Amino acid sequence: MTVKNLNAVTNEQIKQDNDIGPPAGHGHISSPGSRAYFAWQAGELDTGALNQRESGKFFPLNISGVGDSFAPDDVANALPPPDGKIASANQPTGQMLDKPGRHWKKYEVRSGDTLDVMWNFTANHVTRRWNYFLTKEDWNPDLPLSRAQFESEPFYTVQLNLKPFWSHTDALKPPSPTVHAISLPKRSGYHVLLGVWEVADTANAFYQVVDLDFVGDQGGVVLPSTPTGLRAHKVTDKSVELTWIAPSNSAPIASYRITRNGTTTVDIEASNLSWTDNSVSSETIYNYFISAVGETGHLSAPSRAIQVTTLPEGGEDAPPAAPVNLHSMGETSHSVSLMWGSSISSAPVIKYMIYREGEEIQQVVGNQTSFKDSGLTPSSEYRYFVAALDQTGKLSVPSNVLLVRTKAQDNNDGTGDRSWKVGESYATNERARHNGKVWRCIQGHTVYTSDWEPGTPGGLTLWEVLS
């Protein structure tokens, strides 16, 4: 069965989603309807199972314990779903979603269409990104969905750049519904779209499979090819100059469309292969991608996005920006584990200097943004700040001043180990007792949610059992 293409999400669709009621899970794609959504409509899944297509993040990886390269403070991933269990996210409920075949209810689209994908969140999370994957041109629908069936890279990504996540918990929770207007690559016939919603404050992501039917040849229209080589040629505190390479063997191109942070910014005449964004702010992160617009108005698939960070105010002559968000990853009675965000600088940062009570206590190399201060006194307050030194000898202003109090010497349950609980901070290698077992912290952190409990999927990357 094929569902005709809808150009936009309707008010009726939003109302129907809002009527779902309190869930046991977290979120789903309702337009175009995902396999899980259609199964819920047919009574084959309950509301909780609809929303709980949940497994480890960073697909197509097939290992756990991996940190986010963009946001290292995000929780490392749990194990993503195995091949053959991608549509169900390896959840016991919904295993029927993994059945191979061409029988699935499909949504009619055309290559180059802009497809509105609507996510409805029933238990919102602090979000890092959404990745969208498409099956390869030569995929086989009669085989189970596997990594080999999908392109290895997402063709469209929406990323939220605020970090660390615990300083922006409200801003990183997207509204419900959230709609992404994604440009579809060139395909024909039946294909599968995989949407992966990655969470910053847990180890997991949510997996939704949408079945698409790419129809027609658009009346003989040939889509333009995707521009390549998009890069930031020059970056200052006030501007970003982008350059790219015109695609070869392409249908006629009328213009190039630049998209910044998910919003169309400008259309550039086809004779130009560069553009300068003069509306940026200093010390700010921007994402860009580019598409070609054909003479018929049809878009090419978007290029891979690039990320650009503008320089501190003053440009190349400015000293490094202050390290950001100095915070504690955990305290014991004798130590504090510090972490901070990198300094932005026009010249490479070669050192970070750590200060306690106004006195420098340590220097670390420029690619290190953490330090454990040991030998401290129990039940004592300490004030820290960090400064950056770049290759030209320029020193940044200090980071924020962090006030930390070490734990009491006897802060334990009588066994010498603290009990685990939400709201506490734990340093790497620190021990804690929980549910009659002793656990070792394998990644320093503050417990923001009960989902990080030792022994649960969310706690797998944070704790290991000792006895």
Image (spheres, rainbow, N blue to C red):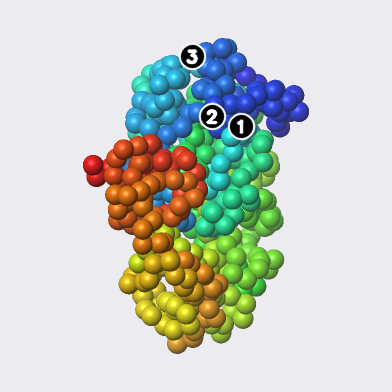
Amino acid bearing label 2: Gly
Q: Furthest residue to the right?
A: 11
Question: Hey, what amino acid is under mark 3?
Answer: His
Q: Residue furthest top?
A: 43
Q: Which residue is mark 2?
A: 25
Q: Secondary structure at mark 2?
A: loop
**Horizontal arrangement in the rendering, residue 207 relative to residue 176 (left or right):** left
**Which residue occupies 62% across, 81% down?**
314
Q: Which residue is mark 1?
A: 122
Callout 3: few (<14), some (14-19), or many (20+) C-alpha neighbours within 10 Å?
A: few
Report whether 277 appears left or right of 354: right
The image quadrant where one finds the C terminus is top left
Across and down, in percent, residue 408 comes to 40, 62
For the residues labelled 1 and 2, say whether their Cβ atoms are less than 8 Å apart.
yes
Q: In this rendering, does residue 156 appear at all? A: no
**Position of the N terminus by quadrant:** top right
State the image coordinates of residue 6 (x, y, percent, origin top left): 69, 27
The 10 Å Cα crowd at callout 1, few under 14, some 14 to 19, many 20 or more, is many
